[in-house]
Structure formats: C-alpha cells, structure tokens
Image: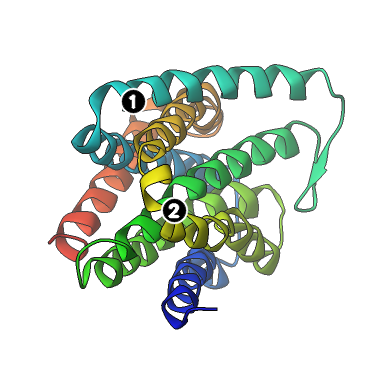
Amino acid sequence: MDASLWIVIAAALLTAIMTGVGALPFLFVKKIGARTMGWSNAAAAGLMLAASHSLIAEGVSIDVILTLVGVLTGLGAIVVADRLLAGAGDVEVADLQGAGAAKALLILGIMTAHSFAEGVGVGVSFAGSEGLGAYITTAIAFHNVPEGLAIALVLVPRGSPIWKAGLWAIFTSLPQPLMAAPSYLFVETFRPFLPVGLGLAAGAMIWMVFSELFPDALDNVKSGSAATAVTLAFSAMMAFQMLVLAH
C-alpha cells in the first residue's frame, strides 16, 4: 500500500482517538446531582449547536444547495429514527436502559453520521494542496475533543461509566479513518458528497438539541439557568474554533 495512504489512515485514526479525550473532565467530577444533570444537558446542547453552525458554514462555502439538501435530509432521518426507537420498546446502550438509552442512541447515531463527513474531509484535504491535509487533520482532531465532551455530558450523568463514555465517543468517530482512505483515492467522486454530509449531520444535531437535550435540561434547572449554560457552551466552542482552528 502507498505510504501516503497509510499517512491518511493514521491521521484520520488520530482524529477519532481525540474524541475520547472529551470524556476526561468527568474524572474530576465526584458527584452528579439533578442540577449538574440539567447543566450537562444544556452544555451538550450548546456544544452541538456550535458544531452545527460550523458544519453548515463549511458546507455552504462548498455548495449552498447541497448543504440545504443535507440539512433537510438529516432532519427527516432523525425524525424517522426517533419514531422507530419509540416503537422498538426498551433498548440498552452504554449501560443505560429505557428512555435514557434511546436518547443516548440517537446522539451516538448523529455523531457517527457526522464523522462520515469529517472522514471524507480528511481524505479530500490530503489530495489537495501541500500542507492542507495536516491542517485539516489538526483542526478536526481538536474539534473532536469538545464533541467527545458533548457525548460524555449525555452519557455519564445518566449512569454510564467514564471509560465507557470515552470508548463510545471514539466509536462515533471511527467512520473518519474508514472514509478517509477511499475519499483520498477517489477524491473527485467523494467531493460532491461532502456538503450533503455536513448538512445532514447539522440538521440532525439541531433537531436533537431542541427536541431532547434542552427540554431535558429544563426538567432539572430553571429556563434562565439552562439558557445561560447553552450560551456559554456555544460561545466557548466558537471561541475555541476561532482561536485554535483559524487559518
């Protein structure tokens, strides 16, 4: 196999592993009460809103129509998935059962779908100008840390062990190394699908925020407190992207 292809796969695998780092802050949280649960849901909502904003902005820079198609497709897909889970009875994932497991499964599914687009982004970037692949890989790797935190914020307060939340976070990013290699080899074939994939993940995330995460936050904290947590998490994610991921 070509050495450059191995570099692409290794780079994408690194971005996946970085997602698990997002669960590490919970090593320092000794007790998770109802109020912490509410703030966790609100913070996860803010992080996912900021991620959605970034995905749409990146997609629009490539193709506005395809990004919009992706957003609407993502909305349709998550609504269908939600209804299928509602009629499927009890599910179990990450040591969670019942309604909490269903919500966790939706979020894990959304973040996994989002990783397909990021994997294509890594592969396409390595086929571009010199140095672009290294930059995109670094950007996605750092971007994956708060995304892993968003996953942990949903799983850990509901009873999932920290180590398992970290592994699930990494699992959601495994499509990155899987998609990076073929998109690098067949860049012209995969390039048009990138804005659709970005929009699809964003549409599903936005639905999840307002259908599940923010209502759950309101069950444990007042609306003003939840809104503050959402805004602070959104602002922190955007500041992180501007300061660390800027060209």
- Disc 1 designates what residue? 66
The picture places residue 241, in percent across and down from the top left corner, at 23, 56
Q: Nearer the viewer, residue 160 or 220?
A: 160
Q: Please, which residue is most extreme toward the right here?
A: 89
Q: Secondary structure at mark 1?
A: helix
Q: Quadrant of residue 230?
A: top left
Quadrant where the N terminus sits is: bottom right
The mark lying in front, picked from 2 and 1, is 2
Q: Secondary structure at mark 2?
A: loop
The picture places residue 198, in percent across and down from the top left corner, at 39, 38
Q: Does residue 43 appear in this view?
A: no
**Tally of numbered discs:** 2
Q: Nearer the viewer, residue 141 or 133?
A: 133
Q: Nearer the viewer, residue 154 or 172?
A: 172
- Disc 2 designates what residue? 186
Q: Nearer the viewer, residue 14 or 217?
A: 14
Q: Does residue 88 appear in this view?
A: yes
For image coordinates 33% across by 25% down, the residue present is: 66
- Give, as a three-letter code, the residue at label 2: Phe
